[in-house]
């Protein structure tokens, strides 16, 4: 309610569909086919299968004197769930390219050249700053250690959990290790329970 009273301008509902190889990545929450489209998944398209991103925008009409804003937003979540379910159905049926369906969405076009130029210019800027400040060795050491930590943690997590979950660094590894540890602990408790039966 406080947020609504302080918002100036329209409130926009955003629904994003991530599609790779004709499959919806962000399908229903409990689906075994669900993939969290993280930075690794999105950038994997440069050398592998590209991820197509479709966005659906809707202006929400909320009266300033609304008594239950939570109900309004929950209904908006239900609308998004219905949209994503329809996406899944359209892709499975092979009809996702129909004009009527696709007119609801805008495709986000990626510019790989622009992306590469940003990365190269950022790297060059860091090197120049390292040279000017006399800390090029420290910069290389920090970069090397961070690269080694993030890549090894992500690789270990992907091997254990078989899916990337990297919205923040180390998340894939930490989540996979935690899930593995909890599963092991659960099995140990089941085995202990059986001995006492």
Image (cartoon, rainbow, N blue to C red):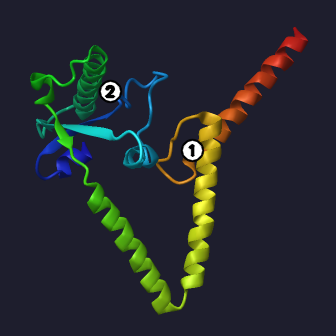
**Residue 22, which numbered label?**
2
Q: Residue at x 85, y 12 (%)?
A: 194
- Quarter of the image with the C terminus in it: top right
- Quarter of the image with the N terminus in it: top left
Disc 1 element:
helix
Determine which quarter of the picture holds residue 187: top right
Q: Residue furthest front?
A: 47
Where in the figure is residue 131, as x and y percent of width and height?
48, 88
What is the distance, in whole Å, between disc 2 and disc 1 at their CAs? 25 Å
Q: Is residue 166 left or right of residue 190?
A: left
**Mark 1 sits on what residue?**
172
Q: Is residue 144 left or right of residue 107?
A: right
Image position of 131 with respect to 77: above or below: below
Image position of 155 with respect to 84: above or below: below
Q: Residue at x 27, y 14 (%)?
A: 93
Disc 2 element:
loop
| Precedes in sequence: disc 2 or disc 1 | 2
Q: Residues within 10 Å of mark 1 (few under 14, many from 20)?
A: many
Seen from the viewer's position, the closer of residues 174 and 162 is 162
Seen from the viewer's position, the closer of residues 124 and 81 is 124
Q: Is residue 154 left or right of residue 81?
A: right
Where in the figure is residue 88, as x and y percent of width and height?
31, 21
Where in the figure is residue 165, as x and y percent of width and height?
51, 41
């Amino acid at each position: 309610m406080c947020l609504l009273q302080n918002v100036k301008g329209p409130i926009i509902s955003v629904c994003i569909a991530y599609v790779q190889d004709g499959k919806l990545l962000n399908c229903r929450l409990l689906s075994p086919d669900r993939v969290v489209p993280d930075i690794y998944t999105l950038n994997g398209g440069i050398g592998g299968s590209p991820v197509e991103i479709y966005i659906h925008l809707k202006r929400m009409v909320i009266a300033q004197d609304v008594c239950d804003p939570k109900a309004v937003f929950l209904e908006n979540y239900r609308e998004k769930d219905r949209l994503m379910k329809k996406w899944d159905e359209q892709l499975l049926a092979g009809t996702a390219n129909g004009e009527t369906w696709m007119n609801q969405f805008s495709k986000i076009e990626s510019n790989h050249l622009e992306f590469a130029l940003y990365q190269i210019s950022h790297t060059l800027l860091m090197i120049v700053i390292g040279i000017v400040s006399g800390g090029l060795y420290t910069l290389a050491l920090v970069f090397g250690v961070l690269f080694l930590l993030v890549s090894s943690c992500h690789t270990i997590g992907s091997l254990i959990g078989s899916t990337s979950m990297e919205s923040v660094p180390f998340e894939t590894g930490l989540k996979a290790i935690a899930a593995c540890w909890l599963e092991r602990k659960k099995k140990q408790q089941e085995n202990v329970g059986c001995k006492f039966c």
